[in-house]
Image (tube, helix red, strand yellow):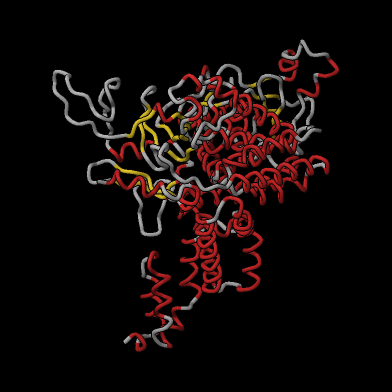
Amino acid sequence: MLDTLPPELLQLVFSRIELDHAARALAALQATCRATRHVAILPLLWEPLYSARWSRSSVNNDVDRHQQFGDDYLQKYKTRFCLDCTAEDLVDALIVTSPPLRTSGAIRMAALGCDVWDVLLNNAHRNAGVRLIGPQDSWSRRYWSWHAVGLIARQEAVSRACAFETMRLEDAVADLSAFFGLDISDNSRLLDTLALQCQEVLVSSRVVLPSNSQHFNADEFCVAVCAWMRDAGFRPARGNHYFRLMNHFAHTFLTSHRETLPMSLVVVFLSVTRRLGLSAAPVNFPGQVLVRVHRQQNGQDCDDDFFVDVYDSEISPILSYGSVEARLQNIPQEHRAQYMRSAGTMEMIARAARNIMHSLRTPSHSDLKERSNHLSAWYAALNVLSHTTEDPDGNYPLRMVDVTHDAFPLDIQPIILQTLVPGLYPDIARRVELDCARRKRDSIDSQSVSLRTSEIKFAVGQIIFHKRYNYFGVIFSWHGHCSASESWINLMSVDALPGGRTQPFYHVFALLEDSSSERYVASCNIIPAHKCPDLPADGGGVCSVCGPDIAPLSMPPFWELVEGLYSSHTQLGRYFTHAEEGASGYGRFLLSPESKASFPEDDTFTTQFMV
């Protein structure tokens, strides 16, 4: 019947297929008959499918595809679909491959770049919660997909860092967000929207914009922009809020952390006013970053320029040259000019990185979500300082290796060795290469299989309760005896414990709200999580598991406990594929292939908790 319809009608019918099913449907229609095939391959039917499936792509690869296929979106779709399949195969390989052998998969994934961003992000299921949402879903798949997304984002940011001096400050600051595995183009889109909102308010208030050079008043315009920023929530952070770690990063200071730092407020001001046509630049002023507004349209400093204090704009936004110079009275006259000139991106982003380091060392930020971002913040700051700071000993790139080795398991070869090292001085590059090689050897040497003995009372994947500190957690590794350093053993008085250092010790993801929620605990201090039996009201009974010295456990609902652990520990997916609840309402965490290889008997051990 379809082959009797005119092509125009077939095209109309096919264009009405829901996007979620259209690609599969059009592919099937191509095999139906010649008439439907001719319509089903039309580029205008495939173009919306292509745009809907892929929001990001490699710019260079896009150019190559256009040169090869022109506007043939069916062929472009097929090409990208094959890349998606390759990326998913690589994720599968990362899940089952031992750590020392993941290097080749990481290199191949990095080479695919932004072309596979969308499929990886879809597999990461960042907002899906602890329950699995399909037969292919697992916490391990989510974990490695997310790390692959982060690898692609961070590689781009590290490769661009060598060009800080030619970048706009807003772009350099946006790149910091890449170390959180985020699409930095989202920041640019947010700033575009903010600029349009600001323009609308200014026009409605009859404030003349820079494009109207005849009646433009720069002072009035800057005061109006500062007022709009305050109304939009961009205000100075005070007190403990000043040291919040995420104040430094565009993806948060443009959204949830609009009460923020001088540097971040200056970035917003410069980004918005640039889009509205103002010529201005940051000033690396001691204590508090300022903005220098150029009177000359060529963007050069001149004596008629004035300054804007965005941070304290509610008090005194416009500052004259003389009033700014007066703030430098303790600095010799011959050095004052350098603190008042327009600053380049390199020195400003270096200042931003030092500010991040200061926030990381300031114990004023205590909420759990921010703590989970510390390593990303360290990584971002160290990358900037590796490219902007005199560092003859190579401390910053070597510390990048420290950060990436465990927390960013795909990054060493494609980012550190292939992207960062070529831009370093030869002697520093050699030190970094040797350090990476040593760590790889150590990783290979540390690969071992831990078989259970009668002394091992608990297992990886088992939920436990700490008798002394009253928290629940899940075991993700163990040793037959304490393997911590001698200094840690002495500090924690391990030898004073029943069983001392010779008893088994367990690595635990703990459900806590403090600064260290990964714990190394002695066997004598933990008991299995369990439901205590109903005891006599007079307190005469004792739970056989808790014993006489522990109050009966108030066991939280299983999935509530799992949700708490999953949301608190981003590393969980490396060790476990999912959780499952047993008949009694108690359950376990199932081991990932990597954990099974190290603890091959533990999955079987935890089946006893499913009855």
Q: Is residue 365 above or below residue 582?
A: above
The residue drawn where x is 71% and y is 48% is: 417
Q: Is residue 528 above or below residue 487?
A: below
Across and down, in percent, residue 62 comes to: 62, 63
Which residue is the extreme one toward the right? 334
Q: Quadrant of the N terminus?
A: bottom left
The residue drawn where x is 76% and y is 11% is: 329
Across and down, in percent, residue 403 comes to: 62, 37
Return the residue nearer the eye: 188 or 23.
23
Which residue is the extreme one toward the top? 330
Across and down, in percent, residue 236 comes to: 54, 22
The residue drawn where x is 71% and y is 15% is: 323
**Number of marks present in the image shown:** 0
Q: Is residue 144 above or below residue 300?
A: below
Horizontal relation, residue 390 to residue 466: left or right: right
> Can residue 213 be seen in this snapshot?
no
Residue 35, picture quadrant? bottom left
Q: Is residue 566 above or below residue 45?
A: above
